[in-house]
Structure formats: C-alpha cells, structure tokens
Image (spheres, coloured by chain):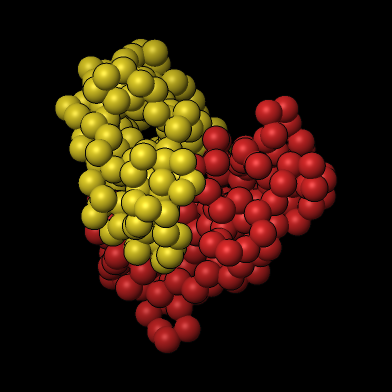
Chain colours: A red, B yellow
C-alpha cells in the first residue's frame, strides 16, 4: 500500500503474519468480474440456473476468490509485480445470496519459508461462512 | 464417458496475439475492488520500476481461459462442459503483464485422470510476447463432476 512500510527480507521470519483482510462480495461484484474476465458461466449470476444444477445459490468465480486473496499479498509487498508464483485449490464455492449482506471472504497469510534471492513462500487461508474456500493457497513473493 | 487419454501431451498452435490495454487492466482491477495505483497510474508503476501499468497477478486468466477453450471444447476430448468446475489454478510468473504487451498462449494438455468418479484435466498455458519473451505459465485443473461413470 502506498505510504505504508514495506516488509524487508531480513525483518521477516517464518511465522510472520501478513495483515489479514475481509472482502465483501455482492452480486454486482460477480457481474463486474464476469465482464472483466470474460467468464459468463451463468452459475455466477443466474440464481435460477445455479439452483437447477444443484448449487445452493449463485456462487463466486473461483478466480474472483483467488484474486481477492492475492490482495493480501500485493497490499503487503507493495509492488504487485513481486509475486513470482501463486497457486490455489478451490475447495468450496463462495455462495453469494441476493441480499444486502451478500457474502464475505476472510483471508489471512503467513510466511511459511524463507527462500534464496530475498524471496519468501507465503501460505494463505481463505474462508467464507466459516468454511475454507481455498486450500493449498501458496505464493512465492520477492521482498526488498 | 472417460476422457480421451491420447490428449495428454498434445500441444496446440499459439493463439493470435492479445494486446493488453491500460483500460482493460483498470477494468479488471475495478472488478476485484483493488485500488492499487500500479494498475492505473503509469507514474506509480514507473516508480516501482515498471515501464507502464501492470496487471494484477491473476489477470492472466483472461488469456489462458480463452486459450483453454480450444482444448476443453474439443468434442473428441469428451469433456461435459456443463458439469465442469475449476479445481486448481496456478501461475508461475516471469514478469508482470503490462499495458502494451502483445501476448500469445500455447496450450498443452498436462494430465488427464479420474478421481472419485470425476474426470479431471490439467492444462498448461505458456504465455510469451510476440518477440518470444516468456511472461507467465498458467496451470489450470478442471473437474467434471460425476462424469467418469461408476
């Protein structure tokens, strides 16, 4: 984030926690993401279709959740270009009801390993409605 | 119906170049609610050492998903796309995508397997500039729920 102190490799240890964030998700966010990404699968915006294929309701794009979780990395490191590797497994969908509350995605991150070249491996956790929505969410980030 | 295993190792021709625009990056950043100035302001991006605005780390899906359709929509593969969900995604990034890039994607089928009655396919999209500079590689695993029979 501009103006905030960026983490330095020598100051970071295994177990260092990244500032966690909670991201609200409403239907409009999924419509915007569909347009921006080109993924118009109706399970992400059409409740009638989603329930007909056995889902509890409209669900967020997995890639939307992956993008939100990445913000914990990029806000921490400052330069989004410092992400060298980023992978996730989509373990559960984020269900987004059509109401004022919508859904939330809570993301936390921890430094799991210090690598050479001023890089660290970060493990992320993402939860929605008290359930893990991403597993094996890992990134390699280059620090100053 | 099981997927056609002969697809493993198959590589597709590079896609036509995709030209990355500043406004497309901004649109994507707005859609994920990310106010980072490196996605919008060329000066802010230059201050970080980038020649122009850069894209968020997952922006590459815009290219790799489109390129992946030529694989997963191939009727000979036998994937029931109506049952497909995204299982895993990984990006290995050589350098961030930036405005002005002209990028091609070369898709390869990495793996096809069946687990717990689900067909799964993993594709690899190697993305480079039209000048041959590697930018990123996207690994995508798609799962077709309950299509493997049994």
Q: Position of residue B58 (x, y in %)?
A: 43, 46
**Furthest-bottom residue in this view:** A100
> Is A104 left or right of B84, judged from the image as shown?
right
Judge by depth and name the residue closer to the eye, A28 or B23.
B23
**Residue positioned 39% across, 23% down in the render:** B134
The relative height of residue A1 versus residue A112 in the rendered view (above or below) is below
> Is B107 left or right of A65, judged from the image as shown?
left
The relative height of residue B26 versus residue B141 in the rendered view (above or below) is below
The relative height of residue A66 versus residue B125 in the rendered view (above or below) is below
> Is B34 left or right of A21, judged from the image as shown?
left
**Residue positioned 68% across, 28% down in the render:** A117
Residue A43 falls in which quadrant of the image? bottom left
- Asked if residue B135 shows in the view, the reply is yes
Judge by depth and name the residue closer to the eye, B95 or A42.
B95
The relative height of residue A85 versus residue B76 in the rendered view (above or below) is below
Quadrant containing the N terminus of chain A is bottom right
Q: Position of residue A144 (x, y in %)?
A: 65, 42
Residue B140 falls in which quadrant of the image? top left
> Is A96 left or right of B130, judged from the image as shown?
right
**Residue positioned 34% across, 51% down in the render:** B42
- Asked if residue A43 shows in the view, the reply is no
Q: Position of residue B12 (x, y in %)?
A: 26, 18
**Residue positioned 21% across, 37% down in the render:** B19
Judge by depth and name the residue closer to the eye, A106 or A134.
A106
């Amino acid at each position: 984030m501009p103006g905030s102190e960026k983490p330095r490799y020598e100051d970071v240890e295994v177990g260092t926690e990244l500032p966690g964030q909670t991201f609200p998700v409403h239907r409009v966010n999924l419509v915007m993401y569909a347009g921006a990404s080109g993924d118009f699968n109706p399970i992400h915006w059409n409740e009638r279709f989603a329930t007909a294929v056995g889902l509890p309701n409209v669900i967020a794009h997995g890639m939307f959740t992956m993008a939100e979780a990445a913000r914990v990395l990029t806000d921490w490191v400052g330069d989004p270009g410092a992400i060298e590797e980023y992978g996730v497994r989509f373990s559960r969908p984020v269900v987004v009801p059509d109401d004022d509350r919508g859904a939330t995605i809570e993301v936390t991150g921890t430094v799991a390993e210090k690598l050479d070249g001023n890089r660290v491996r970060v493990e992320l956790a993402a939860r929605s409605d008290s359930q893990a929505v991403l597993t094996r969410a890992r990134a390699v980030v280059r620090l100053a | 119906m099981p997927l056609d295993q002969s697809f493993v190792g198959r590589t597709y021709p590079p896609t036509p170049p995709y030209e990355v625009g500043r406004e497309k990056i901004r649109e994507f950043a707005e859609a994920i609610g990310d106010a980072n100035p490196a996605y919008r302001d060329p000066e802010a991006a230059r201050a970080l050492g980038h020649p122009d605005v850069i894209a968020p780390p997952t922006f590459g899906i815009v290219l790799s998903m489109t390129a992946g359709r030529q694989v997963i929509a191939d009727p000979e593969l036998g994937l029931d796309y109506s049952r497909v969900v995204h299982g895993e995604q990984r990006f290995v990034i050589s350098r961030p995508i930036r405005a002005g890039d002209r990028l091609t994607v070369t898709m390869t089928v990495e793996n096809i397997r069946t687990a717990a009655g689900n067909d799964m396919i993993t594709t690899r999209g190697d993305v480079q500039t039209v000048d041959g500079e590697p930018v990123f590689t996207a690994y995508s695993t798609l799962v077709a729920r309950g299509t493997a029979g049994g």
